[in-house]
Amino acid sequence: MIEPTISSFQALHERLGLIRATDAPFFLEWQTPTVPLDKREQAFFDHIQQRYYNYYNASLLTEGTVLLSIVALLADIALPQCLAYMIAAPQQPSFGMVTNGSDFIFCKLENAVYDFSEAFSLLSRRHKLYEVASILTQLKKLAGGN
């Protein structure tokens, strides 16, 4: 079981032999321009963003609320755990995403080297949910998804 055994970056480095990338170009996939969302997709994410703000403003934003109403099927796990799961992926590079419901961070793992994107927060003034959706679409294409 990975969860109780990989709970820190030190454990990740020692047990799985992973190292963090030191060169900026290693994980450009989250930064490259992607296909913009169409109006229907934007409307969907506007609705999700507004729903998030409504829960946030009403102090109703619990972990369960976030998981059920905002990020539904996304797991709320730590970055070392995410990378531990990614190392088992059948193809490299592999990509992952970690969220707490408010913030999203993308991960890349290739040949025992990993890196992260910047954090995308739903609390920022810019509509970061569009960027999150666009990056997910980009990474899905790169991973061979439809």
Image: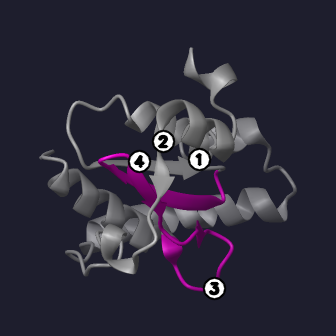
Residue 125: mark: 3
Question: Quadrant of the rendered structure where residue 62 is?
Answer: top right
Q: Residues within 10 Å of mark 1 (few under 14, many from 20)?
A: many
Indicate the position of residue 53 as horizontal and vertical percent values.
Answer: 70, 66
Mark 2 in CB contact with mark 3 (< 8 angstroms): no
Query: Of the residues under marks 3 and 4, which one precedes in the sequence?
Result: 4
Is 85 within the magenta?
Answer: no
Amino acid beneath label 4: Gly
Q: Residues within 10 Å of mark 3 (few under 14, many from 20)?
A: few
Outermost bottom residue:
125
Spatial distance from mark 1 to mark 3, Cα to Cα? Answer: 25 Å
Provide the residue span drawn in magenta. Answer: 101-128
Spatial distance from mark 4 to mark 2, Cα to Cα? Answer: 8 Å
Q: Residue at x 40, y 75 (%)?
A: 23
Q: Residue at x 29, y 69 (%)?
A: 29
Q: Residue at x 35, y 28 (%)?
A: 88
> Disc 2 marks which residue?
83
> Disc 1 marks which residue?
79
